Image: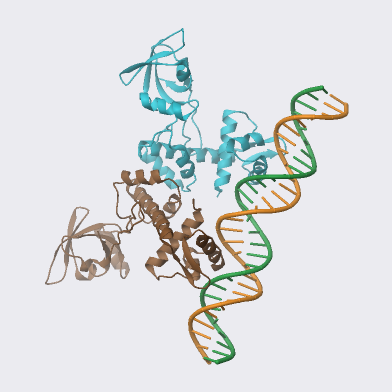
Chain colours: A cyan, B brown, C green, D orange
Amino acid sequence: MLTRAEENYLKSIFHLETELEDVVSTNAIAEFMETKPSSVTDMMRRLAEKELVTYQRYKGVYLTDLGEKVAARVIRRHRLWEVFLVEKLNFQWDEVHEIAEQLEHVQSEELICRLDTFLNNPEIDPHGDPIPNAEGKIKPLEKKLLSEVDINKTAICIGVKESATEFLQFLDRIGIQIGTKIKILSKETFDNSVFIEFNTKRMSLSQKASENLFIKIL
Amino acid sequence: MLTRAEENYLKSIFHLETELEDVVSTNAIAEFMETKPSSVTDMMRRLAEKELVTYQRYKGVYLTDLGEKVAARVIRRHRLWEVFLVEKLNFQWDEVHEIAEQLEHVQSEELICRLDTFLNNPEIDPHGDPIPNAEGKIKPLEKKLLSEVDINKTAICIGVKESATEFLQFLDRIGIQIGTKIKILSKETFDNSVFIEFNTKRMSLSQKASENLFIKIL
DNA sequence: TTTTAATTTTAGTCTCATCTAAATTTTATA
DNA sequence: TATAAAATTTAGATGAGACTAAAATTAAAA
């Protein structure tokens, strides 16, 4: 049984490995987790002891197969709870992270299994990130930015690139959510804005917005 | 913000106060929580420091008004989660305690508020215990034998007086479990049997059976 | 009312997870 | 390549929460 801190470290290393580099540095972890490098070093030794990471002094860490599996399962729990909070408790998708951060540490295989069923085995969370399966396997979604989609194609909104609160609230206001089907009607060359249609509404979206919206082409 | 341990101590003291005595002894807490008396003493000093309990060396503790409110809110969270686990995730009533024990420490007023709404503001948990309201007020339910319940009242089964195997098997066979809601339709004066309704079923129950079944009146 | 037993507290230790400050190793630069 | 800068680790401390063993207090029995 892992402690809450151990789970959080594994999760963070997982994120840093997939999103940035292969070998993760002590400072990168410390910055990401808003803690001190010396605390990270301590924990790395403990995780290495438990064979969850491979760690060499001054050389950074990477997850072992076991560590990766554990991390993916924590992420699975986090994302399933996020789906629950948004779909069942009607939270906004930008309000759920902190709560899911706590719920993800509740220990019960059976709970997560039943929650998954209750939510109809969702494949993506409210931020459009894929939910690992029970074995910790992640089916990577081929993400594109809305700005990269060709005219007349229809795409489904699966998330945002940078989840700044204002942007999330902006999307909320105009009515774009995860799962919203968006058709690209035209692109303006002078300002790179896109003209789109969704839920029978039509509107223009700035370059900045269209470059921050992840979609999946249907 | 209270720690998990502090919340657990307050909850335990609350239970001991209501179920047993007014002033709670160090040993009673230690036994109830399966910990050592010296650990309890330590924590009592910390809780007294925070004005959550009134503590005098060698004289036991009791909750302050604040401590009582905090404890009741932890219990509220616990019982709401139990309802969720049983009603939404289809757990059996005897499987949920351990999981609720973890979920109760998730910190978010908003979460509990929305969960309460999602569950249609339940007043009792799957064990028949009352759920404190958001302010920490508990509407006490009185425990009675089924035989003592008035006609047309609805009660919830909370246990048996003497747990003879044959009686438990009898209950199982007819479909009465902990948490089963039973309505008393009529009483026969000639043999003191009761005619009841539960889960859309109707049947007669002998005096002997109705005097061996603990219920709580809703 | 002593003496004994039970209860409770104190003192000191342990682990986990964090920190600061100092030392060490690696990397980058002159 | 020597040296400065950055990154990383070590050493030592802290606080929460638990423990054991011993001391102190209260309650019970002779």
Number of disc labels: 0
Q: Give the camera-side residue of A176 and B200.
A: A176
- Where the C terminus of chain B falls, by quadrant? bottom left
What is the x, y in percent for residue A9? 58, 41
- Image coords of residue B14 (percent x, y): 41, 63
| Residue B31 in picture, x, y percent from top left | 49, 68
Residue at (63% x, 44% y) in the render: A47
Residue B111 or residue B160, whichever sits in front: B111
Identify which residue, A36 or A138, lies in the foreground. A36
Q: Quadrant of residue D7?
A: top right
Give above or below for A1 relative to D21.
above
Q: Is residue B12 left or right of residue C22?
A: left
> Is residue B92 placed above or below A179 in the rendered structure?
below
Above or below — where is A84 with respect to B4? above
Name the side, left or right, on which C17 lies relative to B65. right
Residue A179 seen in this snapshot = no
Q: Position of residue A96 (x, y in %)?
A: 43, 37
Q: Residue furthest top?
A: A190
**Residue A33 seen by the camera:** yes
- Front position in the image: B176 or C3: C3
Q: Residue at x 43, y 9 (%)?
A: A188
State the image quarter where residue A199 is shown: top left
Question: Residue at position x 55%, y 43% from top?
Answer: A7
